Amino acid sequence: MKAFEIPTDNLYKFIAISGILIILACLIFPGRYAFELMLEAEVIHGQIQLAEQNLKVIETELDSPHIPMDAEDLKKIENLRALRKESIDKSFQLDIDNELLKKKLKYLNWVLFLAIPFCFFGLFLACKGFYLWKTKLQKYQDMIVKNEAEKLLMKK
């Protein structure tokens, strides 16, 4: 049998292997998706904290008493105001990303909720397929092999 060829020589084997594949799919894909969401959540929360710290630094710099003396100080204040606007925009975008992440987590809950029954269904299929394979087919194949071995021993 080739590596990724579906076993079509025996229905019971096909049922058993299909059950195993369903179990693996129910365990691997939701777990991988959950791991990706956890990484995304860590990145977003880190960016939110960084944006909040940057905004605080800019706000304290702008709130400190300034006596504009020359064009350089005015340019610095204008740059700080532009940075504050960028930080507020970035913070707003991060809030949107955070809400999207919450929706993805709700979706993950549904995926996990649906994966559990499918996992049990796959377990049922695998057990039933292996049981039928053993009782309806393998038992007789073993007897055939045993009889052929006994015939060969009798000939000697």
Image: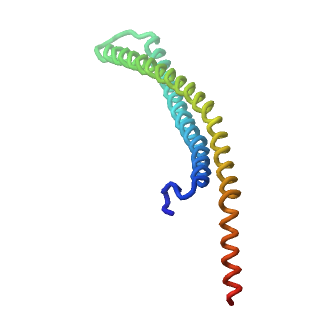
Q: In the rendering, at what x and y percent does residue 22 appear? A: 58, 44
Colour basis: rainbow
Q: Residue at x 62, y 37 (%)?
A: 118
Q: Residue at x 71, y 57 (%)?
A: 135
Query: Can you say whether 76 is above or below 119 in the image?
Result: above
Numbered circles on residues, count = 0
Q: Quadrant of the C terminus?
A: bottom right
Query: Can you say whether 61 is above or below 126 in the image?
Result: above
Nearer-the-camera pick, 77 or 114: 114
Nearer-the-camera pick, 89 or 75: 89
Q: In the rendering, at what x and y percent does residue 55 appear? A: 47, 19
Taking 6 as reference, is 83 left or right?
Answer: left
Nearer-the-camera pick, 88 or 11: 11
Q: Residue at x 42, y 21 (%)?
A: 90
In the displayed orientation, state which residue is furthest to the bottom.
156
Q: Residue at x 45, y 17 (%)?
A: 92
Query: Can you say whether 151 is above or below 42 in the image?
Result: below
Residue 69, image quadrant: top left
In the displayed orientation, state which residue is furthest to the left.
71
Query: Can you say whether 39 is above or below 147 in the image?
Result: above
Residue 88, image quadrant: top left
Q: In the rendering, at what x and y percent does residue 75 appear? A: 31, 16
Q: In the rendering, at what x and y percent does residue 28 appear? A: 57, 43
Residue 77, image quadrant: top left
